[in-house]
Amino acid sequence: MERRLAAILIADVVGYSRLMEADETGTLAALKSHREWLIDPMVGEHHGRIVKLMGDGALIEFPSVVDAVACAVAIQEGVAGRNQGVPEDCRIDFRIGVHLGDVMVEGDDLYGDGVNVAARLEGLAEPGGICLSQQAFDQIETKLDLSYDDLGEQQVKNITRPVRVYRVRLDGRPSPSEAATGRRRRRLRRTIGFALIVLLAGVGLTAGGLRLWKPDVEPASVAAMAYPLPDKPSITVLPFTNTSGDAAQDYFADGITDDLTTDLAKLSGLFVISRNSAFAYKGRAAKVRDVAEALGVRYVLEGSVRRAGDQVRINARLTDAISGGHVWAERYDRRLDNIFAVQDAITRNVVQALELYLTAIDRAPGKTEPETGSMEAYDAVLKARPLMTRFDRKSASEARRLLEHAVALDPSYVQAHSLLGLYYFDEWRLWGSDRDNNLSRALEFAKTAAALDPSAPAPHVLLAQIHQFRREFDAANAEADTALALHPNDAVTLGNLGSMLRYAHRAEEAVAVVERAIRLDPYHPPNYLEWLGDAYFVLGRYDDCVQAVERGVALDPDFVALRVVAAQCYAALGNEQKAREAGANILRLNPRFTISAFVAYVPFTDEGDLRDQVAVLRQAGVPE
């Protein structure tokens, strides 16, 4: 096992149990705020790495004791400032211990006496205080503008030899802003001085010489992000790598990725990038920084899956792209029939690492039990899911066979019923075969899925779409309202909901949910822009409509539905030339397209919406 010398900081909340008993929600919110707005930035500024979060505390590693103690002082000063005006019995205060010692390294975790001594020092600190070991004190005595009290040798639990303890005196310290300015000046002086030493002495910074600290990965730039960071922890789950040496097992690694994405998306406190955009990086050696900047997220979850017989090994690692540090990592070796427990453990660890309320997991739909107890049924669904996204009838037929097998093995498997409903809806919508029977079967499977898990939004969205196309408008609106009340956090579910709402004379809601779907899935398919453009048209926002469809046409010039919306919007703006060009493109891509066929297909609730669209299609030269 690797060993190294490290500066260890351990922080713990004072009276955490009392605070939780008095106000659980308020305590968790305050702790989350301290971590997000103070502790994480301070750790990053002082080159630290959060090894792990432990409910009410944290274990943090630093490359130097100077950085560790400077960070501890900054945290305590910052917490004191944030506690101004907060009632004393509601304040979040920390005790902090800092030690320099030998640690054992396993993965991203640290063990050994170096960690144990820091923990004992934390226990000796006063609320709002910092205690140092002799080893740490020797490194900083003359390097920081601080005063200390020698508390003498202390006998602490599970440490054989007494530990000499020093207390950092924080009274009479400058304000946090003044302290920050002083730290920046001292850091600048140290940097300049070090540079001069290197230039004059010709020191070689090699693997065998001086080793400078650096982040685990190259940090991402918030300014360079393609999208603003959301106001909640944001994450993408990159496709887990199949390390089985058997390409036929790719579907299994992809399925694990899908399920983790879905589990995380069920938590309202997280912003989770869609599977579609994450899978744009499959097979690519993309840097965490580049992924975070392209998708506009702070956290990236990566991993690998190795399946051999009835055994599976899953490695998972969560990285804070902005600091460049690893937040959490773990390896799981399990039997295949324990795969759901592994997924649940990964989700829980990620949520804890992102400092969300642990109670949110218990409220999350479907998190306490796996959807199926049949590994064979689960395997069939994993194989069927990618086939459903190819939109060709041969792949769809194979997906149906697998899903029917899954339902036969486990008649209560919600996802299998929901996907079968989607299969029959696509049979009706995309290929028009056996129309009445397929739409009825889609309705049957969607109802079963919704009854098996009333808290899942996707079956209700599918029901809303089916009822809308059956012209059962009251039922469609009721299902849409149910889905919205369940707060879907998945791009596909939101996009499909927006598609239905634009027909239901609820265009403002359609715009909101489709725009959210696009943000969750920056590499979204072009039909999202068709639905968005159509909703803009209904609202009379014709310039926005044109911008949406032009972006969509750039993604897929042969997508006829986008040309239909383009023709409508150009005609509404009075741009006859562009409208006629769009109309000609409709007929080029689908020579059988007519206004009568359009009217028979689109299920508008409001006759006025339909009349408006027909009128502009005529202006674009679409035949009757």
Image (tube, rainbow, N blue to C red):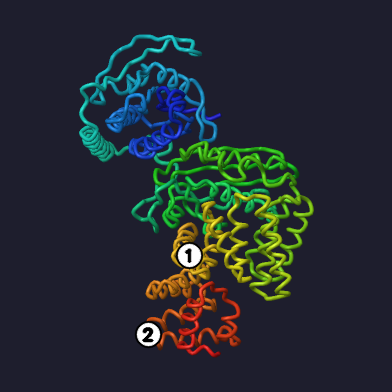
User: In the picture shown, does residue 235 fall above or below 444?
Assistant: above
In percent of width and height, residue 163 lies at 41, 12
Whether residue 143 can be seen here: yes
In the displayed structure image, the side of residue 7 where residue 285 appears, left or right: right
Dot 2 corresponds to which residue? 574
Q: State how far apart marks 2 and 1 are (Cα).
A: 25 Å
The answer to which of 560 and 157 lies nearer the viewer is 560
Whether residue 211 can be seen here: no
User: In the picture shown, does residue 318 fall above or below 517?
Assistant: above
The kind of secondary structure element at disc 1 is helix
**Amino acid tagged 2:** Gly
Residue 441, quarter of the rendered image = bottom right
Around disc 2, counting alpha carbons within 10 Å, would you say few (fewer than 14), some (14 to 19), or many (20 or more)? few
Q: Residue furthest front?
A: 474
> Which mark sits nearer the N-terminus, 2 or 1?
1
User: In the picture shown, does residue 10 fall above or below 437?
Assistant: above
Number of marks: 2
Work out which quarter of the rendered image holds the C terminus and state it. Answer: bottom right
**Amino acid tagged 1:** Ala
The answer to which of 375 and 463 lies nearer the viewer is 463
Work out which quarter of the rendered image holds the N terminus and state it. Answer: top right
In percent of the image, x 44 and y 54: which residue is there?
Answer: 290
Residue 35, quarter of the rendered image = top left
In percent of the image, x 41 and y 75: which residue is there?
Answer: 546
In percent of width and height, residue 531 lies at 50, 69
The kind of secondary structure element at disc 2 is loop
Around disc 1, counting alpha carbons within 10 Å, would you say few (fewer than 14), some (14 to 19), or many (20 or more)? many
In percent of width and height, residue 553 lies at 48, 75
In percent of the image, x 76 and y 59: which residue is there?
Answer: 404
In the displayed structure image, the side of residue 545 where residue 82 appears, left or right: left
Dot 1 corresponds to which residue? 510
- State if disc 1 and disc 2 touch (CB < 8 Å): no
